[in-house]
Image (cartoon, rainbow, N blue to C red):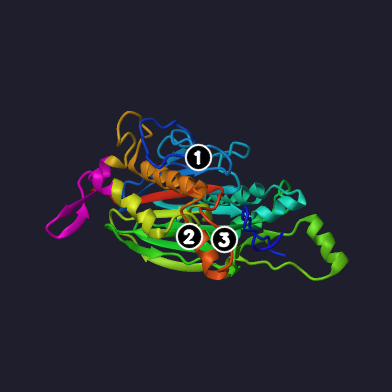
Amino acid sequence: MVSLCLHGPSRTLLGACSTKVTFSTVAQRSFQSSQALSSSDAAFSYRIAASFSAKGRRFKPDTNVLNFNSLTQKILKGNRPDSGQDAFFVSKLGETGSVALGVADGVGGYSDMGIDPAQFSHGLCEHMAEACHVMTEDHQIEQLRARNLMQIGLQKVMQDRLIYGGGSTACVGIARSNGGLQVANLGDSGFIQIRLNAVHHRSNPQTHGFNFPYQLSMASPQLLAQQRLFGGKPMSDTPMDADVTDHDLRHGDVLVFASDGVWDNLSSSEALRLVSRYMTSLGAWESGDKGIAIGDQLHGLTQRGGLGKHPENTLQALIAVAIASEAKAASMNTKVDGPFAKEIHKRFPRENYRGGKVDDICVVTAIAVQERI
């Protein structure tokens, strides 16, 4: 597998849809989550939803969405969302009011070795969610860091007898009830923090070369046999290579965690435009004499049934669906160049690549809400 495949780009392993969202009904489904997020003494809570679409599958806004709420249960293995090689998780951390969340993107090149790339990425997220689920001691939770959680997930994957090899990028966050956020990002998945109609922070992709992201990996038996025959060893990144950043969240901040299926097709400014459209039009943000401010509707819009017609219709789900829908449409557009095509033109001026990049798409949105005392 070469690092650049201009006709149907695919990752190097280490070694059509309308953009208008009509959010009338959303099927009630289970999120890959340990428990519901609620804490009577938490200063902040996080209203979270995810939307996704597997490559080659039609995007269905009513069903390709999951809410994280008081009715969600932990997703069991074998009951994974239809997100292809992309995976995600959300998990409550004990009774502290804090929450862990993240996305992972399986390395497609492993399919050439007969390995399903989704096994590694989904397994990584499942093991991170499970680690959070069983963590009940407050001192353990307080000491948990995003990079540590990524390491725990990787170790569990290496011990999982159902996973024979593979690799994945990962973007993992821990949002605290005091408004603190820590993110560990490895590879070209990533996140943005949006505050009052502006991108407050954007993660930077980590790559060894074009379309060759940093990635966690587990050598397959076939790859190990090749090493014994030809010598050498595969390159392998670890959680210690992840970029770790710390942030202070404010009431009404919006977090968008997503795989490169989103970021290769939408710029951060395009994601901002979508978030701002719904936050302002629905009254979560309001314009005034002093500029943009948090609206009184934010609490209600992010609760179950906040948008009416169905209990699962929430502002965070609407935003997740809007971003996934826009990214899906851009990925199949053969005329308008997205970020991936623009990067090709920058690095390889003679290449005639046009349009978007068809890929699995996964986005997790979280809205920080300061609880009323």
Q: Nearer the viewer, mark 3 or mark 2?
A: 3
Nearer to us in this view, 54 or 316: 54
Q: What x and y, as percent, mark residue 84?
A: 59, 44
How packed is label 2: few (under 14 Cα within 10 Å), some, or many (20 or more)?
some
Label 3 packing within 10 angstroms: few (<14), some (14-19), many (20+): few
| Circle on res. 16 | 1
Identified by mark 1, the residue type is Ala
Q: Which of marks 3 and 2 is nearer the N terminus?
A: 2
Q: Is residue 223 left or right of residue 259?
A: right
Q: Tell which of 239 and 111 is nearer to you.
A: 111
The residue indicated by pointer 2 is 339
Residue 284 visible within the image? no
Q: Name the residue under label 3.
A: 352
Tell me residue 373's x, y (percent).
Answer: 23, 49
Which residue corresponds to the image point at 24% horizontal and 45% vertical from the top-left?
Answer: 281
Q: Which of marks 3 and 1 is nearer the N terminus?
A: 1
Question: Residue 280 bears which disc, if any?
Answer: none
Under circle 1, the secondary element is: loop
Is residue 36 on the magenta stretch? no
Q: How far apart are marks 3 and 2 (CA)?
A: 14 Å
**Magenta stretch?**
279-300
